[in-house]
Image (cartoon, helix red, strand yellow):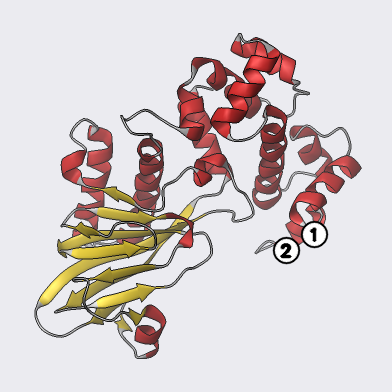
């Protein structure tokens, strides 16, 4: 696997999915409080007008048509026309019947902003470094993506599809939201100066990326730190230190976490036997796999599989 295959493997195993909340037509002076909710990545695309987005601990940003705001980790946020209005909770607006035919309408006077609002969800029991590295607020503006035509094209297509609202639009928009979220994750986890940081830094590090590709390509192998260090062409101590400092976990902890993440995906998405899943995830016996899985997630793999929808 190359570095982007690893990133694709991560998002696939996290079981990233997306859905739309509603379209919003906000008039006059408005302020809507969107409460904290699980660990979803909230998504707001401005279709027309302007909208101010405020997230606790961050400088508020004003979005223009075509701009997108992503708020990871299900954080509370306020969507407003300006700083002055007192926020009204989204739950209160919904209780008052403000959402009709998939459109949230609030405020008086002329139209101020039109939004497309949705979210990306993932397996919330998993805490992969790529999620931990995301900043509290991500803003994508078409004018800032001139050097990244692939990201600009995704954003533009999302905006066009939102305006088109033709047959199949909901399915297309959901897929486009996932694309934009992955593109945002790929570009946003950077330190000042534009260099990648955290897990993305590991993927662009020639030494660490070889080790990560090995872990993702063959999680069933009995990897030792010395084996991974040899692939990285580093000393054992130098590799272990560099990996932990960059990824935020030791090589063996990362390997263990990844095996269990793969196991959850296989239990959810396949009919493989417990023996097959244990073997594919690097465990020599079902009992040892069961003990490790239950210690991490609070229930055994069999109980987890039975609890899944449609089991």
Q: Which residue is mark 1?
A: 303
Q: Which residue is mark 2?
A: 307
Q: Quadrant of residue 33?
A: bottom left
**Residue occupying image coordinates x 67% and y 28%:** 251
Q: Is residue 89 above or below residue 82?
A: below
Compare residues 208 and 167 and report the one nearer the observer: 208
Q: Quadrant of residue 60?
A: bottom left
Q: Secondary structure at mark 2?
A: helix
Label 2 packing within 10 angstroms: few (<14), some (14-19), many (20+): few
Q: Quadrant of the N terminus?
A: top right
Q: Is residue 219 left or right of residue 4?
A: right
**Residue occupying image coordinates x 9% and y 79%:** 110
- Image marks 2 and 1: residues in contact by CB distance under 8 Å: yes
**Residue occupying image coordinates x 36% and y 28%:** 195
Q: Which mark is residue 274?
A: none
Q: Secondary structure at mark 1?
A: helix
């Amino acid at each position: 696997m190359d570095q982007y295959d690893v990133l694709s493997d991560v998002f696939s195993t996290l079981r990233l999915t997306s859905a739309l909340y509603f379209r919003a037509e906000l008039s006059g002076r408005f302020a809507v409080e969107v409460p904290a909710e699980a660990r979803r990545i909230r998504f707001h695309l401005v279709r027309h007008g302007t909208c101010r987005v405020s997230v606790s601990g961050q400088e508020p940003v004003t979005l223009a048509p075509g701009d997108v705001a992503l708020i990871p980790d299900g954080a509370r946020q306020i969507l407003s026309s300006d700083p002055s209005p007192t926020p009204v909770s989204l739950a209160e607006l919904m209780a008052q019947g403000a959402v009709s035919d998939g459109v949230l309408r609030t405020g008086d006077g002329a139209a101020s902003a039109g939004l497309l609002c949705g979210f990306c969800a993932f397996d919330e029991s998993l805490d992969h470094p790529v999620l931990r590295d995301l900043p509290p607020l991500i803003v994508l503006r078409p004018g800032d993506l001139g050097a990244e035509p692939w990201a600009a094209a995704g954003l533009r297509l999302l905006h066009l599809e939102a305006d088109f609202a033709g047959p199949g639009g909901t399915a297309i928009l959901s897929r486009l939201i996932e694309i934009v979220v992955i593109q945002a994750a790929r570009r946003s986890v950077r330190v000042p100066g534009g260099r990648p940081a955290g897990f993305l830094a590991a993927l662009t590090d020639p030494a660490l990326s070889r080790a990560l590709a090995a872990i993702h390509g063959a999680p069933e192998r009995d990897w030792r730190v010395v084996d991974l260090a040899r692939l990285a062409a580093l000393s054992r101590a130098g590799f272990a230190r560099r990996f932990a400092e960059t990824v935020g976990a030791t090589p063996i902890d990362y390997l263990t976490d990844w095996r269990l993440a793969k196991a959850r995906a296989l239990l959810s998405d396949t009919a493989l036997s417990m023996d097959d899943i244990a073997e594919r995830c690097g465990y020599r016996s079902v009992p040892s796999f069961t003990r490790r899985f239950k210690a991490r997630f609070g229930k055994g793999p069999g109980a987890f599989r039975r609890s899944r929808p449609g089991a």
